[in-house]
Image: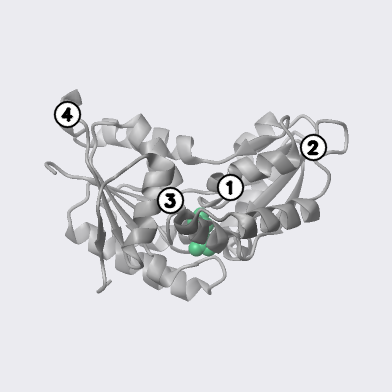
Amino acid sequence: MTGQAIGVFDSGIGGLSVLKALWAAMPHEDFIYIADSGHAPYGERDEAHVLARSRAIVQHLVRHKVKALVIACNTATAAAIQLLRAEYPGLPLIGVEPALKPAVALSQTGRIGVMATRSTLASAKFRALLAAQSGGAKDVHFIVQPCDGLAHAIETSADTGDTTRTQALCAHYTRAIGEFGTQVGQIDTLVLGCTHYPFASEHLRALVGPEVQLMDNGEAVARQTRRLIQASLQPSGAGQRPGEISLFTTGQPQHLQAAARRWLGLSAGVGVLVAI
Ligand code: DGL
């Protein structure tokens, strides 16, 4: 790997959905991805835990001189981005948040489901986002659903290929959100407010039907990161060579390796980080 990489992290493998979009948008950049699977899930832990873990990982990536850092986790963004921006004023930090704004723009029925972790939904950052998007000119109603256990089920399925638990939880939570469809009174847009959930989109799609929009923010985050890099930083590779992706985990390496192979087609080896 030459030049400076872009750091990306998540509580686990979910951030690979964002890495996929980043890689597609910037194929000549190098990326260092950290899955904090040894301390996951974040979504059902308190904010202090998520903040402490985010700080430790950012510190580690900064020591490796990343030129920008993407928090590919809604839960960690909600808990930590404000503080991290204050602690690292010179580091371009990009976070991810549930795609409420694009959902409002797309929805025809004005009924929007939001699936996210309990911790994201309880955060002040999410409450502010919800208030801002509820108070606009368009008459919209959000049905917000904490999805305990779903990120963990998706994590586990990456390794085993067994999606029984993921499917059962998707069925349970979409039923709790309400009736999906494009008729008046039905939910026509579903926000996937956790970076793990796009890896369950096939099951969600089967449950909500083909006409419902599934929204995640991976591509928007990738566009924003590319803009930042082009505007203020040195793009890598100058279009010459393909970028490299380095994968690290605080958990089981075979787990991240299986997920990267399954969802990104990556056969790269995975480094293990024990001390962060
Ligand atoms: N992928 C993370 C997010 O976007 C959370 C998963 C977890 O609960 O650890 O919120």
Q: Secondary structure at mark 4?
A: loop
Measured along the vertical axis of the image, is residue 165 above or below residue 53? above
The answer to the question of whether label 3 and label 1 lie on touching residues, with beta carbons closer than 8 A, is no
Q: Earlier in the sequence, mark 2 or mark 1?
A: 2
> To which residue does mark 2 refer?
139
Q: CA distance from mark 2 to mark 1?
A: 29 Å
Closer-to-camera residue (245/93): 245
- Give the image location of residue 76, x and y in percent: 46, 60
Q: Give the position of the N terminus as an image quadrant.
A: top left
Image depth: mark 3 or mark 2 in front = 3
Q: Which of the two marks, 2 or 1, is nearer to us in this view?
A: 1
Q: Which residue is mark 3?
A: 15
Is the residue marked 3 within 8 Å of ligand 1, measured from its CB?
A: yes
State the separation of the CA atoms marked 3 and 1.
Answer: 13 Å
Which residue carries the number 4 mark? 241
Q: Nearer the viewer, residue 226 or 31?
A: 31
Residue at (60, 42) in percent of width and height? 201
Label 3: few (<14), some (14–19) or many (≥20) C-alpha neighbours in 10 Å:
many
CB within 8 Å, label 2 to label 1: no
Are the residues tagged 4 and 3 within 8 Å (C-beta)?
no
Which comes before the other along the chain, label 3 or label 2? Answer: 3
Q: Secondary structure at mark 1?
A: helix
